[in-house]
Image: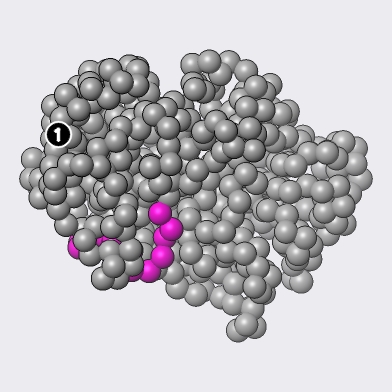
Amino acid sequence: MLDERDLQDPAALAALLQTYEMIDLSQTLQPGIPAWPTHARFGHILYEDYLLGDVARHYQLVMDEHTGTHMDAPMHFIPEGPAHYGIDEVPLERLTGRAATIEAPDLPPGGLLSATHVKEWEEKHGQIQERDRVLIRYGWDRRWGTGPEGTSFLEDWPGLGGDAAEYLVEKGISLVGCDTLAVDAFGSEENPAHYALLGNEVYIVENLKNLDLLPPFCFFMAFPLKVKGGSGSPVRAIALVPGGG
Amino acid sequence: MEIIDITQTVNQKVVKWPDEASPPSQEFVSHTGKGDPATVSDWKMSSHTGTHMDARMHFIPDGWTMEKLDLRRSVGQCRVVDLTHVEGHVSRADLETAKVAGQARLLLKTRNSELGLMQKEEFDESYAAISEEAAEYLVEIGVETVGVDYLSVEPFEDGEFHTHHTLLGADVLILEGLVLTDVEPGDYLLACLPLKLEGSDGSPARAILIRNF
């Protein structure tokens, strides 16, 4: 599998990527998508329109930093210290490269993914290494929808256990992604995964989709908007996997 | 792997088109500094804020909207062309001299980058843009994606927006507001990832280059 550690030659990378299939891991941003109750709902407002005599059509966007598929900056949860920084300061090298996808579709509602589960996955598929990204597929994106169809997405989602988060931090990974609203399980008040990951500058991507299309390892890419001091940002997340045209 | 960020940082003072209604805004929903468990803001911003992409529908009724973009058009090999010597707007002859034919993705580095125009809060109407005949040439040679280093591909004087109509009419993808100040002309891997916005005429984007090869 393509690994950024091997990519000393971007020409080879460009040529290789041409032969890879590109999989979009991002939810479409549209009115009525699932959101935290306290956050702005996604929407857009018409600024100008050629049908109204203007030269172009142009919208204003309204959203929250944590709308749709998005990334958390450390300052989202970390109030002070070296990890208290915003989304514009997240180092881009950490956000692209090899990613492991761990399957966990059988956890009960509100269940926690354990460090043991991660180690068992490694025994089967290979070691997660320093700098790797780790994506967790709970299969929760099947509950995504607009309006009432998305209600169940906002209830009972599973999450990353504190022991698993600590284990991944010790491994020196760069990022954790999941297909749920938050990396910590529904109702978590302690938010152990958020604190362990963000406190150690391991970035988080939430509300991913299509993780079922990924092999155990893929080439991942997700870059946030460069908004000064943002606690997060919607992102376009993609994966490149061998075998496309 | 070395990544060069070619994105303008956005805050409330980021340069915007002179007649644009309002600057981007950031409103705190919660803040760790006030005892909340997490810091969160809501945003309002134009779909053309800072470094961004135009969807075809921006000027062409029934043109494609952001969620339908083929990401291959903005992720792949690209060439950064040195046009910093050009006075006025980029002409057909400038592009011919630069030998850009055969490139699918082109980023035009002009004096705008040398002057740091994207970083200046005040809008500067003397920016370098793509003349209509240069836009026609880009279409002729089959360029699929073109990027510029100020807010618009359009010369400020052109009230008819010929450059946009020529490029978007031929379905050339437009990237605007790139920051190429620290980028040496040459070949790179480009990744410009916009948000997957349903029905939108454009999207702010994060744009990066992977180093020269």
Q: Say which residue label 1 marks.
A: A161
Residue ranking furthest to the left: A189
Q: Quadrant of residue A214?
A: top left
- Residue at x-position 42% and y-position 32%: A215
Against A55, residue B55 (above or below) is: above
Tell me how the rendering is colored: one colour
From the viewer's perspective, tell me whether residue B7 is left or right of residue B146: left
Q: Amino acid at mark 1?
A: Gly
Secondary structure predominantly adopted by residues drawn in magenta: loop
Q: Quadrant of residue B187?
A: top right
- Residue at x-position 49% and y-position 75%: A46
- From the top left corner, tell me how far across and down residue B142 is, in percent: 82, 48
Q: Is residue A7 visible?
A: yes
- From the top left corner, tell me how far across and down residue B163 is, in percent: 77, 61
Which sits in the foreground, B161 or B189? B189
Q: Chain of mark 1?
A: A
- From the top left corner, tell me how far across and down residue B81 is, in percent: 76, 36
Q: How many marks?
A: 1
From the viewer's perspective, tell me whether residue B123 is left or right of residue A209: right
Q: Residues within 10 Å of mark 1 (few under 14, many from 20)?
A: many
Against A234, residue B99 (above or below) is: above
> Where does the magenta region start and end?
A27-39
The C terminus of chain B sits in image quarter:
top right
- From the top left corner, tell me how far across and down residue B84 is, in percent: 76, 37
Q: Is residue A30 magenta?
A: yes
Against B6, residue B30 (above or below) is: below
Q: Is residue B26 visible?
A: no
Q: Is residue A220 magenta?
A: no
Q: Secondary structure at mark 1?
A: loop
Against A31, residue A184 (above or below) is: above
From the viewer's perspective, tell me whether residue B34 is left or right of residue B176: left
